[in-house]
Amino acid sequence: MNAVTVTLNPVIKLSDDAFYELCQQNHDLRFERTAQGELLIMAPVGGEGSSREASAIAQLWSWNKQAKLGVVFSSSGGFKLPNGADRSPDAAWIAQARWDALTPEQRRKFPPIAPDFVIEIRSASDDLKPLQAKMQEYLENGVRLGWLINPQDRQVELYRLGQETEVLQSPSSLSGESLLPGFRLELDDELFG
C-alpha cells in the first residue's frame, strides 16, 4: 500500500520522543517521518510481502550469526537519519563498532544512525518512484550498500555509495560485496515468486 502523507508543520511539530511514543501507541500502523517533518502512515504489509521480508531478514541474520560482524534489524525498527528523517527499511545491518558507539538510550529508541546496509522490497501496491527516492535518501545519509528488490519486474536495483545505480534483471542471488563478506542473498521463489 502506498503511504498516506500527513503534513504536520507548522501546526504540529513532533519531537523525536513524541514521534517515538506515537509509534509505540499505534502498533497496527507503520510510521516514517520525512526530513521535512511529514508523517508517512503505512498499513502492515500483506502475507506475500511479509514472507519476502522474513526471507531476506532470515538470510541476513543467519549470515551475521556466523560472521559476527554487526547487528541485523527488521522492518519494525526505525532509524533517525542525519537529515532528520525517521526511516524503517525492510531489513538493515549496522557494523558492530558503529552500533557499539551508540549509548544504551540511543539503541533503545530509534538509533540516530544510518545503517551500513539496507534492503527494501517492493510490495504489489507500492509505486516504484518513492522507493527509489528512499534508496537515494539512504545513500545521501551514509548507507554504503542498498538493494531495492522489485519482484513485480524481477529486478534488483543496487545502490552503492558514490556510484551509479545498477539494475539487475532476474538475478539468482546477490553478493554482500566487501561490506558483508561471504553474504549471499538467494532470490528464490520466496523473494521473487
Image (spheres, rainbow, N blue to C red):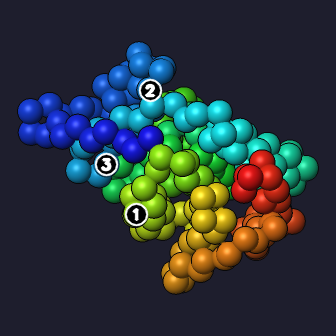
2 vs 3, front mark: 2
Q: Position of residue 161 (x, y in %)?
A: 54, 75
What's under tag 2, amino acid-wise?
Leu
What's under tag 3, amino acid-wise?
Thr
| Disc with the residue nearer the chain's start (2 vs 3) | 2
Give the residue displayed 24% in from the left and 32% down from the top.
14
Q: Position of residue 97 (x, y in %)?
A: 68, 53
Dot 1 crowding, Cα within 10 Å, few <14, some 14–19, many 20+: few
| Disc with the residue nearer the chain's start (3 vs 1) | 3
| Left or right for 85, reference 57 | left
Q: Can you identify the residue that label 2 sits on? A: 29
- How far is the residue under mark 2 from the one under mark 1? 22 Å
Q: Nearest the camera: 180 or 91?
A: 91
Q: Position of residue 166 (x, y in %)?
A: 59, 80
What secondary structure is marked by label 1?
helix
Q: Which mark is residue 34?
A: 3
